Amino acid sequence: MPTAYVLLNSDLGSDESIIEDIKRILATEDIEYEVQGVYGVYDIVLKLSSKDAEKLRGIITNKVRKIGKIQSTLTMMVIEEQEKS
């Protein structure tokens, strides 16, 4: 199943509101997701899984990355062939 990890940097103190926005946006989509705030270089880690890789790309580009107070993102798509072994 296509999976992506998205690492997000946010404005100081806005991580909780961004996490709530992500949950609200993804609740209407037919995908599996996990989102958590983290310490370190990034502020939020988002894991997305869907049967459709193009749908994942669209959600990341057109919905997640457009949330206010997100400074930057780093997206990593899982190599599906290696996921099975």
Image (spheres, rainbow, N blue to C red):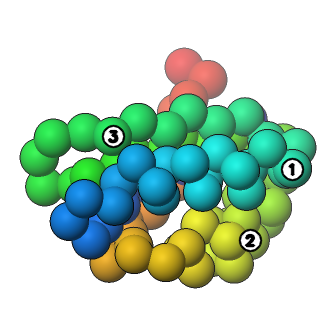
Q: Is tag 3's residue or tag 1's residue first in the polypeptide sequence?
A: 1
The residue drawn where x is 63% and y is 76% is 61
Query: In which quadrant of the rendered view does residue 75 lie?
Result: bottom left
Q: Position of residue 64 (x, y in %)?
A: 59, 67
Q: Position of residue 37 (x, y in %)?
A: 33, 40
Query: In which quadrant of the rendered view does residue 9 lie?
Result: bottom left
Please state which of residues 58 and 1 is positioned toward the viewer in this rendering.
58
> Can residue 81 be seen by looking at this rendering?
no
Q: Is tag 2's residue or tag 3's residue first in the polypeptide sequence?
A: 3
Q: Would you place residue 19 above or below residue 55 in this image? A: above
Q: Is residue 9 left or right of residue 73?
A: left
Task: Give yes or no for contact between labels 3 and 1 (Cβ–Cβ under 8 Å).
Answer: no
Q: Residues within 10 Å of mark 1 (few under 14, many from 20)?
A: few
Q: Would you place residue 55 above or below residue 29 in this image? A: below
Residue furthest out toward the left: 40
Per the image, the residue denoted by label 2 is 58
Per the image, the residue denoted by label 3 is 37
Per the image, the residue denoted by label 1 is 28
Name which residue type carries label 2.
Answer: Gly
Q: Nearer the viewer, mark 2 or mark 3?
A: 3
Name which residue type carries label 1.
Answer: Thr
Q: Position of residue 38 (x, y in %)?
A: 25, 39
Q: Residues within 10 Å of mark 3 (few under 14, many from 20)?
A: some
Q: Nearer the viewer, mark 2 or mark 1?
A: 1
Q: Would you place residue 7 above or below residue 60 in this image? A: above
Q: Position of residue 22 (x, y in %)?
A: 60, 53
Q: CA separation, marks 3 and 1?
A: 21 Å
Quadrant containing the C terminus is: top right
Name which residue type carries label 3.
Answer: Gly
The residue drawn where x is 71% and y is 65% is 59
Asked which secondary structure carries label 1, the reply is loop
